[in-house]
Image (cartoon, rainbow, N blue to C red):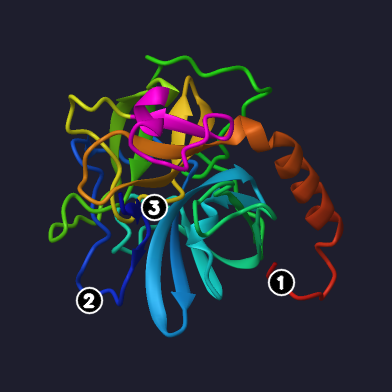
Amino acid sequence: MKLLLLLVAFLLPSKAGAGEIIGGREARPHSHPYMAFLLIQTSGRQGVCGGFLVREDFVMTAAHCWGSTIKVILGAHNIRRQERTQQRISVRRAIRHPGYSKQNLLNDIMLLQLGNRATRNRFVRPVALPQSKAKLRPGSLCTVAGWGRVSQTRRTDTLQDVQLRVQRDQECSNIFRAYNGQTEICVGNQRERKTTFLGDSGGPLVCNNVVQGIVSYGRSNPTPPGVFTKVSSFLPWIKRTMRRFEQQGNHTETPWD
């Protein structure tokens, strides 16, 4: 089955938005202050992804959201407006996990070191990382937010959110050949038309105020379940990488991995 990268990669029309999560609703403005909107430039084409602030100087997203230049917008609700709450920051370094595979999307996680530290306030605030590899139980109810499409043709400019349930690994391994329950999470009940879609890549799966997953990929038709990168499996790499580049922050070496 063809996998769908939930990145939108196309030249954005001047009045087009980035869309919405399927089966969700418009989020209460600034109720997800960790959300980041990514504008990605690669080979003359522009794409969009989601992401989330994990520290004042780092945003986390999916590795397949990499681009030659990336601009981060924090504190946004309507990404087509110049809201006073927004902070627009260039990315200094995009650090993909060294084990990331374009072929099967394993280890689909990336850290973005910001060129300037974000200003923490009630509109912009990091989300908590999990403390350990404690297993996220099937049936757990979590929230996903993003600006991704509602269909192939319909978009919206405002942040959407939806509540999705964690599924047994078997639900995804039956559909996706490369699914790995050690590093990925299966999310979304097949009996409900609620899921992430194009443009939601890199966004966070938040359970009890802790980020547990990153939107990675799904089916080409927008039906659940979808596959999320399991954040807890990468905690050593996350902490080591942020520590390493914090120490190198004032150097002038090449800013991309």
* Of 180 and 143, the residue lying toward us: 180
Q: Nearer the viewer, mark 3 or mark 2?
A: 2
Residue at screen point 49% across, 51% down: 104
Q: Give the residue at the far left of this rendering.
A: 153
Q: Secondary structure at mark 1?
A: loop
Residue at screen point 23% across, 55% down: 19
> How many residues crowd around disc 3 within 10 Å: few (fewer than 14), some, or many (20 or more)?
many
Gap between marks 1 and 2, in whole Å? 29 Å
> How many residues crowd around disc 2 within 10 Å: few (fewer than 14), some, or many (20 or more)?
few
Gap between marks 3 and 2, in whole Å? 20 Å
Pointers 3 and 2 in contact (C-beta within 8 Å): no
Q: Position of residue 84 (x, y in %)?
A: 40, 57
* Of 45 and 174, the residue lying toward us: 174
* Of 42 and 92, the residue lying toward us: 42
Gap between marks 1 and 3, in whole Å? 26 Å
First of labels 1, 3 by sequence position:
3
* Of 193 and 127, the residue lying toward us: 193
Q: Position of residue 1 (x, y in %)?
A: 30, 49
The residue indicated by pointer 1 is 255
The magenta-colored residue range is 170-187
Q: Quadrant of residue 215?
A: top left
Q: Amino acid at mark 3?
A: Ala
First of labels 3, 2 by sequence position:
2
Q: Position of residue 224 (x, y in %)?
A: 26, 35
Q: Nearer the viewer, mark 1 or mark 3?
A: 1
The residue indicated by pointer 2 is 13
Residue at screen point 42% across, 85% down: 44
First of labels 1, 2 by sequence position:
2
Q: Is residue 61 above or below residue 162?
A: below
Q: Amino acid at mark 2?
A: Pro
The residue indicated by pointer 3 is 76
